[in-house]
Image (spheres, rainbow, N blue to C red):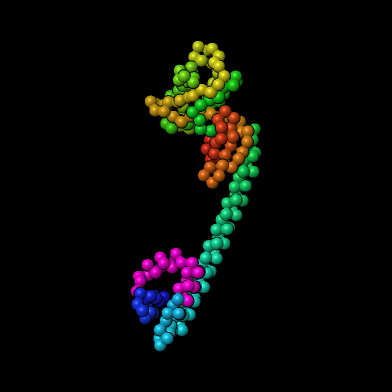
Amino acid sequence: MTIINTGNTASTVGSAATSPAVGASVAGSMTQADFLKLMTTQLQSQDPTKPVDNSQFVSQMAQFSQLSATQDLLTSMNGLNSTLAGSLQASQLLGSSNLIDRQVLVPSSTLSYGGSAVTGAVNVANAGDVKVSIFDAAGNAVRTIDLGNQGSGFARFTWDGKDDSGNPVAQGTYSMAAGSNGSSQDTYAAGTVTAVGYGGSSVGTYLQVAGVGGVPLNQVAQIL
């Protein structure tokens, strides 16, 4: 490709002195309008006694055609990607609607006690003796559940809503923590799916889980 020197009174057209890497960078950022303007300026500024070589001009036209075709292809691909993404999202949303009224196990550090037994789980990283502690809103421990020796994986438990003395506790939200071999373990709560929605590209499809709230679909550990 040629470079137009517009810094002198008599404009001249010479061979490109830029490296292939620089040329590729410039070409990659040019639009069709930029390319056409460059060719037009080149023709207007050429030395009448030394016109652009025909083969060189044909080569530049071929580059212009290639640039146009590439940009059209990129536009088509972007449109196709958007269409596919929309279709996949709609399909996932409709498929997830089958989970409504089903119970799922999702990450949670709380249990919502409404008068009946609630189910939770511990994701045991390493086999060992697992204990779950349940605390009230003031941070007081109300119940400790010993799950015994558990292998790695999910270990479920059920809390009947009573403290360590066997007395019923008030309904409400309680926090929980689990430990095994002196290290904390991730806790999960079971809840019924009441709705399904889409939270945008950053969240994707999510489930509204009773007692927990909105949970991204990819965080569901188990369907009970």
Drawn side of residue 108 relative to residue 89, left or right = left
Q: Residue at x 40, y 86 (%)?
A: 50
Quarter of the figure that contains the N terminus: bottom left
111 relative to 42, above or below: above
Q: Position of residue 182 (x, y in %)?
A: 38, 25
Q: For the point 53% across and 29% down, which residue is it? A: 189
Q: Could you tell me if residue 82 is visible in this image?
A: yes
Vertical side of 200 occupied by 84: above or below: below
Q: Residue 46's image quarter? A: bottom left
Residue 51 percent location from the top left of the image: 43, 85
**88, above or below 123, in the image:** below
Looking at the rendering, the stretch of residues picked out in magenta corresponds to 17-40
Report the front residue among 7 and 24: 7
Q: Judge whether residue 27 is colored magenta.
A: yes
Residue 201, how many percent across, how many down? 54, 46
The residue depicted at 55 percent of the width and 30 percent of the height is 212
Q: Residue furthest bottom?
A: 49
160 or 155: nearer the eye? 160
Q: Is residue 13 magenta?
A: no
Report the quarter where the C terminus lies: top right
Asked where in the image residue 92 lies, by quadrant, the reply is top right
Q: Is residue 149 visible?
A: no
Q: How many marks?
A: 0
Q: Main secondary structure of the magenta part?
A: helix
Going by the image, does 123 lie left or right of 88?
Answer: left
Q: Residue furthest front?
A: 9
